[in-house]
Image (cartoon, rainbow, N blue to C red):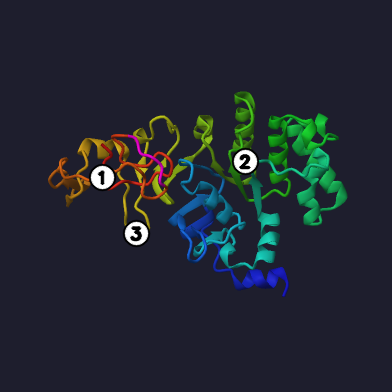
Amino acid sequence: MMYGDVKRKVQIEPLPESLALQVIDIYHVYGLEHQNKVVALKGVSFDINKSEILGIIGPSGSGKSTLLLALGGMLKPIAGQIFYSDGTDITKLPEEDQFEFRRHNIGYIFQEQNLIPYLTIEKNIEMPMKLVNTPFAKRKQRVKELMETLGIWHRRAHTPKRISGGEQQRVAIARALANNPSLIFADEPTGNVDIETSTQILELFNDLKEETETSFLICSHDPIVGDFSDRTLEIRDGILIGEHLEGIDLTNLDSSRFLVLDNQNRITLPENALKQLQGTLLYTWDIIEEGLILKPFGKTDEKRERKIKNCTTCGVEIPKGSYSCPRCGAKLTRVVR
């Protein structure tokens, strides 16, 4: 069966014109039977708009990399659906057809550039176009165009080991853009470059989203990424807990966070709110004209409260006065004292 035949079998109606991607209730678990299992994603749902730069932030182990791999078809989630603009659910494609789909529709910028060490820079960038049988002349023209835009044309005959880390990252970006994908997933794309180069890369992304309707999902801890993102999703312990619009302050996420109601109808309260509530576990609620109001019902008895020293999810030691794990972001049922 040809790829096109398989694709038709896993297509529904195309997404609304404004959407590039729709993610519905993605779950993923690491670990084999009879082993300790880690639930990396717990029902993640969101949309990516066309011509949008969407950021994603969260502590180490929160599920960011797993999510990027699932969206790009390099990891099959155990449940959920991932629809592209034409209606294709990439989670239903056989592995060999996912390869073909990625080559035509997705660009991926890895945290480690994953360049082919024995090929020149020019050949590295050209490789994705060879895989989809782009004519020779068109490949050469596209490579030169990308390398000149990213300021690495003078390095075209070098191998990756003979250029700097920042230049290697520019090569990885050029390679991701080679086939004019509709979506680009980037894992720390500015991690190995200076501020000036980071700005140039993000300005390029911003220009491309306007000119070609390319959409970007950027996973990064770099504060400058927030200046170029249209929206930013915040993920902790495999759950989307908040969304931020332009002007996000990574040093004070509480100042710009919109709380997210997840697929299990859960809302994760901000750390500052939990501290002010001093460990209250029970709440009454009411609907008022302005919205939903939660009222603390009693206070935790500090004398009887169980003392927590380690996260029950990942085992890391928890600092005193915390209501969430600094490594995985898991919320604690009792404050550490």
**Which quadrant holds residue 10?**
bottom right
Position of residue 95 relative to residue 188, above or below, is below
Q: Which residue is mark 1?
A: 334
**Residue kind at label 3, given as amino acid type:** Gln
Spatial separation of the CA atoms under disc 1 and disc 3: 22 Å
**Residue kind at label 2, given as amino acid type:** Gln
**Residue kind at label 1, given as amino acid type:** Arg
* Main SS category, magenta section: loop
Looking at the rendered structure, which numbered label has been put on residue 264? 3
Q: Nearer the viewer, residue 207 or 256?
A: 256
Q: Nearer the viewer, residue 74 or 206?
A: 74
Where is residue 237? Give x, y as percent: 42, 49
Spatial separation of the CA atoms under disc 2 and disc 1: 36 Å
Q: Nearer the viewer, residue 267 or 37?
A: 37
Where is residue 89? Give x, y as percent: 56, 64
Q: Is residue 171 magenta?
A: no
Q: Residues within 10 Å of mark 3 (few under 14, many from 20)?
A: few
Q: Secondary structure at mark 2?
A: loop
**Which quadrant holds residue 192?**
top right
Q: Residues within 10 Å of mark 1 (few under 14, many from 20)?
A: many
Comparing marks 1 and 3, which lies closer to the viewer?
1
Residue at the spot x=48%, y=42% of the render? 60
Looking at the rendered structure, which numbered label has been put on residue 111? 2
Residue at the spot x=54%, y=55% of the render? 21
Residue 153 appears in the picture as rendered:
no
Residue stretch rendered in magenta on the structure: 315-319
Q: Earlier in the sequence, mark 2 or mark 1?
A: 2
Q: Is residue 316 magenta?
A: yes
